[in-house]
Image (cartoon, helix red, strand yellow):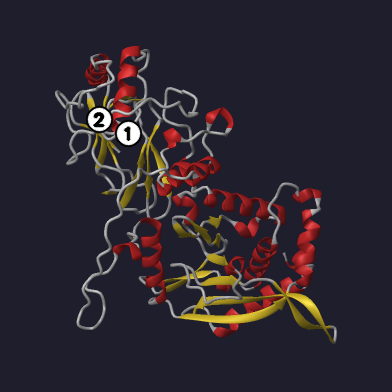
């Protein structure tokens, strides 16, 4: 992961943070050239084809150079940051300290000059941003330097023109560090265009929360008045369509990271495995009643109890009774690989796209243990903290499309798996129950399977077993 270029500088390479990954995108740098770093300190956040991951530096030193800007996709094994260590760390920190001390403390600050400095980002020249830097260990910036920094900031905010002093807005408590916020909150701020340095924190110890970012984003903007440009209608083409299109009417989103990997996997799966999907409509009234009973059970206090929990258990029961459904197709060896364990995947929609983390050895878990694992999986996915390892090795998947109000769907298999169960919305519908039409809680299940290794009989048995358990959930006790 690291290599020595000389006796005092180390190059930190982009590691393989997941099995077999070849590249990752740099989402956020947490340090800048001149910053002091310590062993284990997170220096950046990267996004792979599987998840967002924070990268810690493995040694002490001073940042000399960032080789790539945020938003760059870098191959695994490529150096991304240079750090001066040992005697080189002191030499790297000294010019920065002197530059701060020599800054003139005047309201009319001069243009920052790049004398004696190297470009901070390869191909991007010297940085002129106002990013705050970490303080050097054992040293405090002189008061004159702090005043000059404030003057430069005021000039930059005024686009080079002097502006009258305004009352200071509430600011985050001075911590001597960057604003305190978790990575998901930082990404939210980046997506919304909110500068965390301007956000007033409400969390404990001055931590910025998602609510703080949303509040900052919702504040009305006060742009300077300017003359509106005259509207010019584009000349029509011979067909009657405008000669050029208004680019503000559409948005282009780069396909990368999780979304790119998901797209490639779905295309590969759809055109490799012959999909078959079967459907069944089920009366889940008793299951819904059991959910309410479990919520009142002390054994489930603090656990995530919902219909998905019992559906997951019902699928595990069906797999136990029909183990051949839990298999994969080995094309190279021309073999069917039957798994004697179940890593149960749960599809989760996140801001980065659809991910499918899985519960390892779900077949061996009791119902309370399964509830705990489901709760942890969902919370981790929402926070954007799902690790690459959590998304590897799945054997069977559940996708709950019912949360979006739709009845069902025809899900595409995850690569390497033989079955995926889609759960539709649970709705109150007229249903024949004990010879009479009554309002009952009803849902539709859809099971897609790989027809190379799962024939219609096996797929039908699995789907029928899941439906039977949900109609009579007490069977969970006798069949589990």
Horizontal side of 59 relative to 277 (left or right) equals left
For residue 242, which numbered disc appears in the image? Answer: none
- Give the class, few, some or many, for how many residues have Cα within 10 Å of label 2's Cα (few <14, many ≥20): many
Relative to 379, say whether 81 is above or below: above
- Image coordinates of residue 457 in percent, x first then y, are 59, 84
Horizontal side of 219 relative to 21 (left or right) equals right
Residue at left offset 43%, top offset 37%: 196
- Image coordinates of residue 230 in percent, x first then y, are 26, 60
Residue at left offset 60%, top offset 81%: 279
- Give the class, few, some or many, for how many residues have Cα within 10 Å of label 1's Cα (few <14, many ≥20): few
**In the image, which is nearer the foreground, mark 1 or mark 2?**
1
Helix, strand, or loop for circle 2?
A: strand
Residue 289 in view, yes or no: yes
Which sits earlier in the primary sequence, circle 1 or circle 2? Answer: 2
Relative to 268, say whether 434 is above or below: below
- Image coordinates of residue 399 in percent, x first then y, are 56, 66
Relative to 162, say whether 17 is above or below: below
Horizontal side of 407 relative to 86 (left or right) equals right
Q: Badge 2 is on which residue?
A: 10
Q: Distance between the residues labelled 1 and 2?
A: 36 Å
Residue 475 in view, yes or no: no
Relative to 225, say whether 275 is above or below: below
Residue at left offset 37%, top offset 51%: 48
Which quadrant of the structure image shows residue 62? top left
**For this rendering, which residue is in front, 399 or 318?**
399
Helix, strand, or loop for circle 1?
A: helix
């Amino acid at each position: 992961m690291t290599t020595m270029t000389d006796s005092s500088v180390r190059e930190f390479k982009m590691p393989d943070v997941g099995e077999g990954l070849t590249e990752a995108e740099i989402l956020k740098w947490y340090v800048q050239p001149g910053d002091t770093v310590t062993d284990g300190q997170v220096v950046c956040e990267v996004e792979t084809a599987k998840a967002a991951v924070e990268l810690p530096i493995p040694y002490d030193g001073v940042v000399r150079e960032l080789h790539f800007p945020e938003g760059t996709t870098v191959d695994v094994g490529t150096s991304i940051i240079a750090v001066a260590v040992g005697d080189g760390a002191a030499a790297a920190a000294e010019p920065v300290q002197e530059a701060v001390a020599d800054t003139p403390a005047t309201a009319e600050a001069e243009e920052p000059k790049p004398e004696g400095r190297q470009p901070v980002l390869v191909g991007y020249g010297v940085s002129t941003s106002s990013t705050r830097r970490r303080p050097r260990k054992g040293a405090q910036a002189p008061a004159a330097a702090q005043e000059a920094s404030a003057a430069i900031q005021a000039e930059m905010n005024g686009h080079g023109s002097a502006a009258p002093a305004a009352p200071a807005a509430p600011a985050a408590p001075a911590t001597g560090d960057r604003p305190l916020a978790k990575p998901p909150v930082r990404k939210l701020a980046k997506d919304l265009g909110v500068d965390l340095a301007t956000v007033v924190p409400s969390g404990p110890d001055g931590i910025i929360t998602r609510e703080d970012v949303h509040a900052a984003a919702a504040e009305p903007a006060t742009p300077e008045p300017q003359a509106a440009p005259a509207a010019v209608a584009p000349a029509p083409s011979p067909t009657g369509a405008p000669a050029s299109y208004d680019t503000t009417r559409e948005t282009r989103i780069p396909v990368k990271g999780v979304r790119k990997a998901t797209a490639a996997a779905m295309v590969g799966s759809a055109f490799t495995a012959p999909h078959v999907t079967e459907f069944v409509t089920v009366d889940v009234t008793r299951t819904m009643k059991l959910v309410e009973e479990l919520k009142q059970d002390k054994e489930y206090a603090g656990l995530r109890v919902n219909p998905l929990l019992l559906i997951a258990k019902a699928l595990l029961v069906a797999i136990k009774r029909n183990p051949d459904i839990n298999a994969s197709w080995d094309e190279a060896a021309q073999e069917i690989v039957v798994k004697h364990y179940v890593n149960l995947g749960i599809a989760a929609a996140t801001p980065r796209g659809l991910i499918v983390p899985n519960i390892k050895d779900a077949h061996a878990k009791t119902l309370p243990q399964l509830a705990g694992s489901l709760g942890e999986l969902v919370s981790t996915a929402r926070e954007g903290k799902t690790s690459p390892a959590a998304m590897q090795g799945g054997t069977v998947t559940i996708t709950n499309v019912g949360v979006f109000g739709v009845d069902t769907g025809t899900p595409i298999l995850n690569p390497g798996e033989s079955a995926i169960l889609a759960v539709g919305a649970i709705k109150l519908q007229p249903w024949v129950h004990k010879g009479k039409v009554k309002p009952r809680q009803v849902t539709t299940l859809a099971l897609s399977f790989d027809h190379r290794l799962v024939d219609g009989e096996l797929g039908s048995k699995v789907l029928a077993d899941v439906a039977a358990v949900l109609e009579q959930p007490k069977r969970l006790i006798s069949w589990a």
